[in-house]
Image: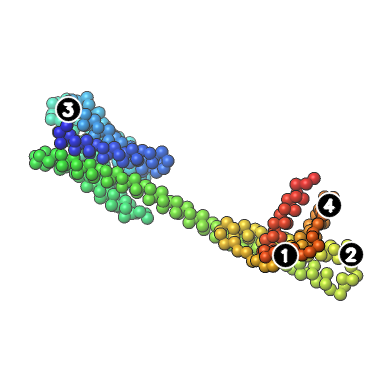
Amino acid sequence: MTLEQLCNLFNVVAVVIPTVFSGGLTLTHRAAYFRSWTLSLALCALTLILETYTQGIGHAIAPTAVEVALYLASACYSFKMAAQVAGRDGRTTLYVGVAAGTFALYLGLSLAGKPFELAFMPAILYLLASQLVLGTRMIRGGGPLAMARAALGWLLIVTALWVLTYPAAVALHLVAAGFIVSGILHLVLGMGMLLLLLAEIAAGLERKNEELRAVERLQAEFIGTMNHEFRTPLNAIKTAAWLLGNSGEVDRLSARQRETVEIVSLNAERVIGLVNDVLDFSKIESGTMSYEFEVTDLNQLLERVARSLNQLFESKEIDLVLELPPEAVVADVDAQRIEQVINNLLSNALKFTH
């Protein structure tokens, strides 16, 4: 294998590598412009592979016609990508029509016996025009990644214009060096496009995270407002029950009425606790939950919970039996949280017991 063939092989591999990675990414990330880019790059890779094959057999019309068709199809996808980058639908009717005319011109010149370089030139110029338009669109595009997109746009223009150095490289016997530079440009450009897509994906995820954080903030504000609005009337009920149970008129109440007043007070506290539970769930989700530890008599805590729920158990004809040790059971706990736990256990037991 000659040095020129080896360098050309490097150029082919440099296009194939980003093509493979781009094809893999399009399976999971369906950005419209990136699909167009991947198809354009894949067609270019096929063209270069075919061109390497035809070097040994000359420029016969049949294989070179396929080569020209691939170049023109690649150009169509580059034009489509340019439209998508500019925010348009990227319809290919016009591009395909011009490509078909260019292909017919190639066949006409070839059948007329014109040199391959002359017949092939319109297709190359069409591909060059598509890449220049795409590069310009990327440079002019806005958005959060405008600088990265513009850098790739300039690199695309340089890569496209590099084709024009081929005649000078032939004259100066520097074709091998030309292939090396072309391969490097293609490799950097292809991997740059991959990084651009990944950066856009990361930016999109960050935007979604920010939206979720905004929703969480609104949820926390709503829960806080709801908590305040519910607690105000519930505290009034609790206070009224306490005043009724501790006023001078309490002796005029029967034992059953006093018990009912006490249950109203306890259940008002329980509903306030339920409202606080909703606020607690929000705190747990946001990671701002806090605890207040204090020395607590668990016997008294359990008696208080049992009294608040006893009437509900009686309504279902279920006996709630409280068996406590004679001595105090003291622990350093968050009394409110422990009461929540016992309340939830007994409420669930009541709910799911016939």
Give residue 177's position: percent from left, percent from top: 15, 42
In the rendered structure, find residue 330 and report the number of the disc placed on it: 1
Q: Give me the C-alpha separation between circle 1 and circle 2.
A: 31 Å
Q: Based on the displayed image, in which of its 4 quarters is residue 274 positioned?
A: bottom right
Q: Earlier in the sequence, mark 3 or mark 2?
A: 3
Identity of the amino acid at label 4?
A: Asp
Label 3's element? loop
Label 1's element? strand
Mark 2: few, some, or many residues within 10 Å (few <14, many ≥20)? Answer: few
Q: Earlier in the sequence, mark 1 or mark 2?
A: 2
Give residue 241's position: percent from left, percent from top: 80, 67
Q: Earlier in the sequence, mark 4 or mark 1?
A: 4
Identity of the amino acid at label 3?
A: Gly
At 12% across and 41% down in the image, what residue appears?
174
Give residue 263's position: percent from left, percent from top: 81, 62
Q: Mark 3 highlights which residue?
A: 56
Q: Are marks 3 and 4 in contact (CB under 8 Å)?
A: no
**327 vs 55, nearest the viewer:** 327
Q: Mark 2 highlights which residue?
A: 255
Q: Are marks 3 and 1 in contact (CB under 8 Å)?
A: no
Q: Are marks 2 and 4 in contact (CB under 8 Å)?
A: no
Identity of the amino acid at label 2?
A: Ala
Q: Earlier in the sequence, mark 3 or mark 4?
A: 3
Q: Give me the C-alpha separation between circle 3 and circle 2.
A: 110 Å
Q: Mark 4 highlights which residue?
A: 319
